[in-house]
Image (cartoon, rainbow, N blue to C red):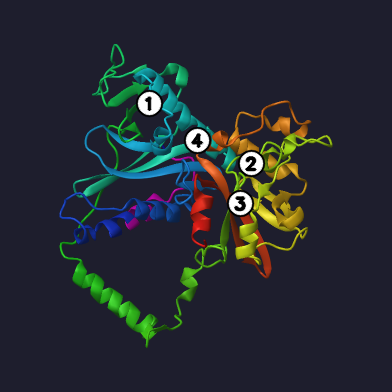
């Protein structure tokens, strides 16, 4: 399939060939060595897209604010290749798959995959029909590009497959691998590794690019780097003290910030009580369920533990001072509220909640947020576990002299990992 967005394939493959030519630095294999992160960066540079690879989402790249792309590179021979698309170590460790037969396990794993994907779609405000895989498939002295749709697994269409991909008459309870299909793709689940794999089907005659590998690239690289450093930076260190460099600007990110520093460029906030590690039933993301006045569904706030203000007193503006908060679905006005500045809210209050709750449960209609709060159970920590996200990363950057903020979801355990650095 052809990608639905602008993709400079020539620029991309020129980069692939350049990096691939250095393969002998790492391997004697005749298949070019290309690190997955390098391939992601080259794809981003060839599509002018946003890097999501460090955000633990179903996509590595967001192109044009609309298309979600999973970027992969692997060695491929023949017409297809089975590759990993998701891991479920935490769910498996907590017993989510215990005692299930192969059919029930295939459905349970697929349901979790779907929940994660739906949650990411809702968070970014994109549609599943606008998602795909970009694969760089490597072979002997060559590579080709493969694009394939990224789909939700059709749970009601799951059927067993034989280990070689053929149709099986029944589920095999003795096998460590569960092979199944939903009629549109073939999958397998490795019980011991808790990893879900997908079979990628290639075109019969893909366009292949030759990649020449320099037999001994080290002398040339050493000469080039020495020449570059000799006239662009000069002496980098003197007496153990770093000197400024003319290329300092290259460390700047596109939004004008420097590389992320915890507590300066970003903080992590939990979507649960930092004391009890539970989602409180009438506050935080469940503020809509609080008693008292009539509330709209979606009224919510992000809790700010006292330790955040204690360690980083200048990160947020003062209480009730409005600032702009960028969400993946748009920008809202926000402020720090409540005694002790323990809440980050949007203004009006329900806008932030529409995004938070929409990611927690993408099945909720947007029209539900314009109505009074329904009689439904409050969200629990189990709902955060289900989508694999229990915290919010707040990034701070400056436009002109005005501080601006950006919010994105963070993986399970992110808040604890963040505060442990300052304990």
Q: Is residue 298 visible?
A: yes
Cα–Cα gap, marks 1 and 4: 18 Å
Residue at the spot 73% in from the left edge and 25% down from the top edge: 375
Find numbered disc 3 in the image and state the secondary structure of the residue it sits on: strand
Reading the image, the residue beneath label 2 is 356
Q: Residue furthest right?
A: 293
Is residue 189 found left or right of 131 in the rendered image? left
Reading the image, the residue beneath label 1 is 185
Reading the image, the residue beneath label 3 is 407
Q: Is residue 283 above or below residue 236?
A: above
Instruction: Give the magenta-colored segment's residue range.
Output: 3-15
Cα–Cα gap, marks 3 and 2: 10 Å
Q: Is residue 86 above or below residue 344?
A: above
Find numbered disc 2 in the image and state the secondary structure of the residue it sits on: helix
Which of marks 4 and 2 precedes in the sequence?
A: 4
- Residue closer to the observer: 265 or 31: 265
Q: Is residue 281 above or below residue 182?
A: below
Whether label 3 touches label 2, CB < 8 Å: no
Find numbered disc 1 in the image and state the secondary structure of the residue it sits on: loop
């Amino acid at each position: 399939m052809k990608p639905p967005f602008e993709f400079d394939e020539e620029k991309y493959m020129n980069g692939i060939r350049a990096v691939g030519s250095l393969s002998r630095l790492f391997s004697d294999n005749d298949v070019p060595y290309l690190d997955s992160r390098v391939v992601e960066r080259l794809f981003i540079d060839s599509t002018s897209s946003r890097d999501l690879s460090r955000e633990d989402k179903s996509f590595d790249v967001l192109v044009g604010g609309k298309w979600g792309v999973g970027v992969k590179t692997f060695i491929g021979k023949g017409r297809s290749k089975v590759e990993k698309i998701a891991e479920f170590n935490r769910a498996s460790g907590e017993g989510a798959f215990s005692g299930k037969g192969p059919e029930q396990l295939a459905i349970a794993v697929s349901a979790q995959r779907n929940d994660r994907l739906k949650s990411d779609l809702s968070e970014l405000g994109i549609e599943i029909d606008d998602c795909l895989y970009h694969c760089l498939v490597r072979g002997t002295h060559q590579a080709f590009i493969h694009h394939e749709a990224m789909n939700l697994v059709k749970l009601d269409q799951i059927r067993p497959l034989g280990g070689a991909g053929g149709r099986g008459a029944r589920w095999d309870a003795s096998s460590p691998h569960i092979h199944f299909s939903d009629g549109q793709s073939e999958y397998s689940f490795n019980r011991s590794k808790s990893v879900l794999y997908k079979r990628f089907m290639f075109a019969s005659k893909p366009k292949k690019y030759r990649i020449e590998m320099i037999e001994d690239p080290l002398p040339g690289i050493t000469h080039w780097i020495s020449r570059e450093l000799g006239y662009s930076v000069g002496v980098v260190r003197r007496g153990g003290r770093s000197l400024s460099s003319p290329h300092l600007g290259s460390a700047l990110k596109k939004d004008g910030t420097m590389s992320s520093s915890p507590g300066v460029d970003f903080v992590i906030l939990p979507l649960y009580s930092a004391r009890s590690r539970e989602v409180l039933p009438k506050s935080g993301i469940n503020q809509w369920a609080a008693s008292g006045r009539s509330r709209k569904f979606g009224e919510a706030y992000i809790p700010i533990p006292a330790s955040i203000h204690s360690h980083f007193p200048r990160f947020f503006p003062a209480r009730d001072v409005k600032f702009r908060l960028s969400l993946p679905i748009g920008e809202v006005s926000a402020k720090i509220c409540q005694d002790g500045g323990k809440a980050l809210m949007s203004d009006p209050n329900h806008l932030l909640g529409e995004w938070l709750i929409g990611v927690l449960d993408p099945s909720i209609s947007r029209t539900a947020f314009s109505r009074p709060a329904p009689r439904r159970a409050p969200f629990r920590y189990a709902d955060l576990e289900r989508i694999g996200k229990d915290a919010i990363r707040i990034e701070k950057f400056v436009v002109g002299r005005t501080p601006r903020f950006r919010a994105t979801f963070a993986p399970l355990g992110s808040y604890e990992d963040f505060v442990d650095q300052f304990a």
